[in-house]
Image: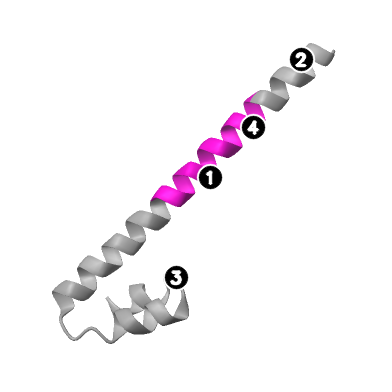
Amino acid sequence: MNFVASNMNIDVKEKQKLLEQPNLEERTKTSLIHLNHEINMIQMKNEIQNKVRVDIDEQQREYF
């Protein structure tokens, strides 16, 4: 769990706070919250990229 927490894409203060939690269950729950947030951000990024790609493709078709 410490390895996963130390390699998460979060602020250093948040990592430190997470790694200092003595209770493994709480540390795991907090890690899952952060990981779920990161997954949501990646999904939103992918959706935006896909929408932009589709829009650009449509514009290019209309142009030609």
Tell me the residue at 40%/48% (across/down).
40
Check contact, mark 3 vs mark 2: CB within 8 A: no
31 horizontally vs 50: left or right: left
Label located before the other in sequence (3 or 1): 3
Q: State the CA–CA distance, disc 4 to disc 1.
A: 11 Å
- Give neighbour class at mark 1: few <14, some 14-19, many 20+ (Cα, 10 Å): few
**Residue numbers of the magenta segment:** 40-54
Q: Which mark is residue 61?
A: 2
Label located before the other in sequence (1 or 2): 1
Residue 6 is situated, as x and y percent measured from the top left of the image, at 39, 78
Q: Quadrant of residue 8?
A: bottom left
Q: Amino acid at mark 3?
A: Ile
Label located before the other in sequence (4 or 3): 3
Disc 1 versus disc 2: nearer the observer: 1
Q: State the CA–CA distance, disc 4 to disc 2.
A: 14 Å
Question: Dot 1 lies on which element?
Answer: helix
Q: Which mark is residue 10?
A: 3
Tell me the residue at 71%/23% (across/down).
57
Q: Is residue 53 above or below residue 59?
A: below
Q: Is residue 42 in the magenta section? A: yes
Q: Is residue 48 in the magenta section? A: yes
Q: For the C terminus, which image quadrant?
A: top right
- Residue placed under numbered mark 4 in the picture: 52
- Residue placed under numbered mark 1 in the picture: 45
Check contact, mark 3 vs mark 1: CB within 8 A: no
Disc 3 versus disc 2: nearer the observer: 3
